Image (cartoon, helix red, strand yellow):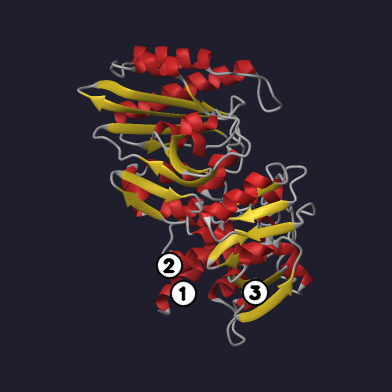
Amino acid sequence: MRIHVTVNGTGRTWEVAPGDTLLDVLRREGFAGVKKGCGTGDCGACTVLLNGRAVNACLVLAVKAEGGAVVTIEGIAQGGRLHPVQEAFLEAGAVQCGYCTPGMVLSAVSLLSHNPDPSEAEIREAISGNLCRCTGYVKQIAAVERAAARMRESR
Amino acid sequence: MAVHQVESIVRSTSIEEAWDRRRREPHASRFLAGGVDLVLYAPPGVTTLIDLSGLGIDSVRRDGNDTVIGAMATLTDVLESPLVGKATDGFLPRVLQGIASPLQRNVATIGGAVVRAHPWSDVVPALLVLGARLDVFDGEERTVDLADARGRSEEPFPLVLAVRIPAAQKGVRAAFEKFSRTGFDVATLNCACSARMERGVCRDARIAIGGTPSVAQRLPRAEEALAGKSLTASVMAAVAQVAALEIDARDDRRATAVYRRRLAGVGVRRCLESLAGLGMEAKE
């Protein structure tokens, strides 16, 4: 089957099998920042934005993205500058092995696009589908708070 | 992981076309809503998916006194809907907030949750105590009670177009409890109760318990034990005991029947305590 999707702002046309997941296709097409972890929607390593919402790419059939807009971790830096959430993750030391980081960052980006001033509880809820086995979650939460403050200041 | 058994996906453009295809291939086809469940638990022998994305059944609207949630609305759409929040006094959004993670709620649909109706579904007991009905199509459009629809063994199950929630009458309260460590966990047991409080006594009592390990069902004997009573400690204890005995409790790998009866009693009591003190309330 042929699908038409916009990935990180660029239109793409891909041949996919009916049962391919969005994760399968994105990785096959070179978007290696989309990590494959559990494959069952538990770990969140495959998180991407689909039409502005964070989703588990492993649980979305690729055909469901037809006509939609996908953003992967490769697509959030602008003009060579990291996204404020990426900068905040680095500054807060919220990165260790890095496997969960793309998904965690995209969940945070999705949260801040809908809620610029989230409470700690809302941040915890937003990243509740992203598991980190290295650092715990304290530094990621601090990073999201830092990014939120910076993004509000720059508005 | 790719669902290798799927050979074709049909993008339906009309309700009639989708139903006709499903009816002609009852065993080899399934409707494709959000797709979460199909990716995780693709039924053996299913090779055709009938995508419902193009049917325009994903909005939330008012229809008279009812709030009508399109079957393709995601759980996020529902929990963020001001109409749903108002119609249920925040009860349904709070229940949905405790299910899975935002990543899954952004994809999973209310229609999918109702049709698949997993034994551990938190959506089903919540909708049962709200008196939800389903707009369905199986050659003609009709509305059926959710409680009745779930008891049928039609194959194929009619195409669900919407979940219809009646306007809450004045004084209606609802509460939800589930026994799980996090929203990600499959609840060992879940429980929802609602009642209309009239001069201090319960009317129109509804009690539903799921994960027994069967999917949630209303409990007529427990509801009868609550009807017309005030929410005193002794009434709550008595209703909880009736519910514990009434559920179809069985052993499975998650819990024993004995433990489930214990949970049912505790869950009902906690829900009733919420009803006694609060408006529509959902607690994890």
Mark 3, chain letter?
Answer: A
Task: Tell me if residue B11 can be seen.
Answer: yes
Quadrant position of residue B129: top left
Mark 2, chain letter?
Answer: A
Residue at the far left: name it. B199
Where is residue A81 drawn, in percent x and y?
Answer: 59, 84
Mark 2–mark 1 distance (CA, rounded to whole Å): 10 Å
Mark 1 or mark 3: whose residue is earlier in sequence: 3
Mark 1–mark 3 distance (CA, rounded to whole Å): 35 Å
Q: Is residue B135 above or below residue B56?
A: above
Q: Nearer the viewer, residue A92 or B152?
A: B152
Q: Are marks 1 and 3 in contact (CB under 8 Å)?
A: no
The kind of residue tagged 2 is: Pro
In the image, are marks 2 and 3 on the same chain?
yes
Which quadrant is home to the N terminus of chain A? bottom right
Q: Which residue is mark 2?
A: A116
The kind of residue tagged 3 is: His
Where is residue B8 drawn, in percent x and y?
Answer: 73, 58
Nearer to us of marks 2 and 3 is: 3
Where is residue B193 drawn, in percent x and y?
Answer: 41, 28
Q: Nearer the viewer, residue A4 or B54?
A: B54
Q: Which residue is mark 3?
A: A4
The residue carrying pointer 2 sits among few (fewer than 14), some (14 to 19) or many (20 or more) residues within 10 Å by Cα, namely some
The residue carrying pointer 1 sits among few (fewer than 14), some (14 to 19) or many (20 or more) residues within 10 Å by Cα, namely some
Q: Which residue is mark 1?
A: A150
In the image, are marks 2 and 1 on the same chain?
yes
Q: Are marks 2 and 1 in contact (CB under 8 Å)?
A: no
Residue at the far bottom: name it. A79
The kind of residue tagged 1 is: Arg
